[in-house]
Image (cartoon, rainbow, N blue to C red):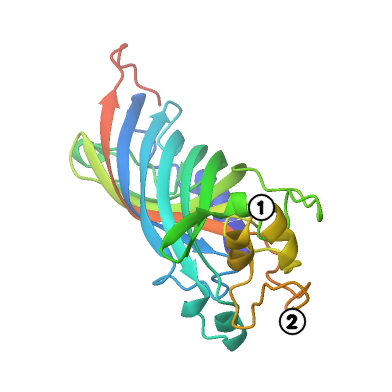
Amino acid sequence: MKGIKFILVFSFVSYFNITAYSQGKFYKHTEIGLLLGGLHYAGDLNQRFNIIHNIGPGASILVQRNSANLRWGWRNTISAGRFSASDKNSTNTYLQNRNLSVRCFVAEASSQVVFNFLPYEIGGNTAGLKFPFTPYVFAGLGGYYFIPKAELNGVYYNLRDMDTEGQGTVAYQRRRASAVQFAMPLGLGFKASINKKVGFGIEWGIRKLYTDYIDDVSKSYIYPAVLVRERGVEAALLSDRSANNVLEDGAIYSNLYRQRGNSNTKDWYSFVGLHIVWRIDDNRGRCPSY
């Protein structure tokens, strides 16, 4: 969080300190682009922020409106992707024995404010008055829909329906996490102008989440017989996949009520990738601002 605070403070200071280059003509315009890359996850199944084993394909459609000046823009995005995570990739012996895994699809819509550190716009390099490149930051609000699944005997099950920690069951009455949640996108990137109409860049945007169930791991193990009775044998098997998992009634359940995840920390996901953007000028009188 210290890094995010530094970016915001630096952005505020830069806005007032670098003004000599923003006196050229500025025309209101829209940018439409596509980001291709990956969707990465950090949470109970990726506590050490491993990137290689916890990233999947991701993409975004970007629409940015530039109507104020060369520094500020308003952007709307539609994003989708999938990530995977597994305890098998952990170096911690306890987590390896826990043996949980998830494959999650995420679809997101968000709106963000974008700030350029340098006075930039696509085509700026041809005018000779503006920077043809800039680092930038963004922040905003959004919502996302997610489907966490796990494989059992060759079949992928929707973990939200399994209630693996007793959510929604009569016995435990824990609240089931909604499939639609709020998120706060925060990120940074670098972009450059290729010609009068096209720009490209690289971006990394993290999402602060308000749920700990995007990976279906949060609290403690529950009594397996409850899941067998209310959700079926598959739910009980997906709830506790460790080596000492026994389902017969009357058996000693060594994991009962032990910690399954850490509910004190929320999950995160992020989109990272390369983007290409096309500039579309307003057809309504090109009146410059100074």
Mark 2 sits on what residue? Answer: 254
The mark closer to the camera, 2 or 1, is 2
Residue at 55% across / 82% down in the picture? 96
Find the residue positioned furthest to the bottom.
93
Horizontal side of 61 relative to 157 (left or right) equals left
Residue 253 location in percent, x, y? 74, 78
Between discs 2 and 1, the one toward the N terminus: 1
Quarter of the image with the N terminus is bottom right
Q: Nearer the viewer, residue 184 or 187?
A: 184
The kind of residue tagged 2 is Ser
Q: Are marks 2 and 1 in contact (CB under 8 Å)?
A: no
The kind of residue tagged 1 is Thr
Q: CA distance from mark 2 to mark 1?
A: 28 Å
Horizontal side of 36 relative to 215 (left or right) equals left
Image mark for residue 211: 1
Instruction: Tell me if residue 53 comes above or below residue 90 in the rendering.
Output: above
